């Protein structure tokens, strides 16, 4: 895995999990299905939202940042210094800029987990398989895997119950290494600036042109 693709994986760890409710249902009890339906309805209601996040990798290293989201299609993950990482979806392309490494990469939105979460309608009939719905003292967690078994590992999305709110998620890879994201103050927003969802390649074009 290249550093740029590793950056994308880390940056979209949140999106991977937030995408979980695009769920291909495994056999669920009526009570479990009711919780999943509540989660999906809540996520679909987040047409515009913003909040802070703390991301902790399997080695205990933590990074912080701010996320902005505008469905359908648009999101921004701005990591605080000294990370230098910025991930922006403009509705068609996901751009990943790493200022420290001086890299800039782009991926089709449809090829990333963001496409599930940022879709106009979050689907319940394809994508991943729910492996567990766990009740907590003050909420619940939905754990899921790739329904097509093309991607190993699992993701777990955590909600509070009263009021219903997304509080974070954990992505566990094929080697059992977890990446945890805790949300702080995720709230609905209105009128987010369109420029938040635009990220142009900062590198000079044709740097050799004009030289003799």
Image (tube, grey):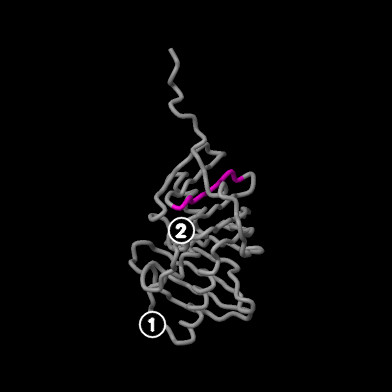
In the rendering, at what x and y percent does residue 105 appear?
A: 45, 43
Tell me: residue 143, above or below residue 208.
below
Q: Quadrant of the C terminus?
A: top left
In the rendering, at what x and y percent does residue 75 appear?
A: 52, 55
Label 2 crowd (10 A; few <14 / some 14-19 / many >=20)? many
Mark in the foreground, 1 or 2: 2
User: Would you identify the image quadrant in which residue 48 lies?
Assistant: bottom right
Tell me: residue 205, above or below residue 6.
above
For image coordinates 63% across by 81% down, the residue present is 137
Q: Residue 158 has which mark? A: none
Residues 26 and 189: in front is 189
Label 1 crowd (10 A; few <14 / some 14-19 / many >=20)? few
Q: Residue furthest bottom?
A: 30
For image coordinates 49% across by 86% down, the residue present is 31
Is residue 89 covered in magenta? yes
Residue marked by disc 1: 27
> The residue tagged with tag 1: helix, strand or loop?
loop
Q: Residue furthest top?
A: 212
Name which of mark 1 and mark 2 comes first in the sequence: 1
Q: Residue 114 has which mark? A: 2
In the rendering, at what x and y percent does residue 87 appear?
A: 52, 49
Tell me: residue 30, above or below residue 70.
below
In the rendering, at what x and y percent does residue 170 appear?
A: 53, 65
For image coordinates 43% across by 59% down, the residue present is 115
For image coordinates 52% across by 45% down, the residue present is 198
The majority secondary structure of the magenta stretch comes to strand
The residue segment tinted magenta is 83-91
User: Would you identify the image quadrant in which residue 67 lies?
Assistant: bottom right
Is residue 210 covered in magenta? no
Q: Is residue 31 shown left or right of residue 68?
A: left
> The residue tagged with tag 2: helix, strand or loop?
helix
């Amino acid at each position: 895995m290249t550093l740029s693709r590793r950056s994308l994986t880390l940056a979209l760890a949140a999106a991977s999990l937030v995408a979980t409710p695009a769920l291909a249902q495994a056999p669920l009890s009526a009570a479990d299905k009711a919780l999943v339906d509540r989660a999906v309805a809540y996520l679909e209601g987040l047409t515009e939202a913003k909040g802070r996040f703390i991301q902790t990798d399997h080695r205990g290293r933590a990074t912080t940042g701010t996320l902005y989201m505008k469905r359908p299609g648009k999101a921004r993950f701005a990591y605080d210094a000294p990370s230098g990482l910025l991930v922006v979806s403009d509705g068609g392309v996901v751009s990943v800029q790493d200022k420290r490494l001086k890299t800039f990469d782009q991926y089709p939105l449809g090829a990333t987990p963001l496409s599930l979460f940022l879709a106009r309608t979050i689907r319940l009939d394809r994508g991943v398989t729910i492996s567990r719905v766990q009740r907590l003292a003050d909420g619940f967690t939905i754990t899921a895997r790739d329904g097509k078994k093309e991607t190993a590992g699992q993701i777990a999305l955590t909600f509070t119950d009263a009021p219903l709110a997304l509080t974070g998620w954990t992505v566990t890879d094929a080697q059992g290494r977890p990446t945890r994201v805790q949300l702080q103050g995720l709230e609905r927003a209105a009128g987010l600036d369109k420029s938040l969802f635009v990220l142009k390649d900062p590198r000079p074009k044709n740097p050799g042109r004009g030289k003799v």
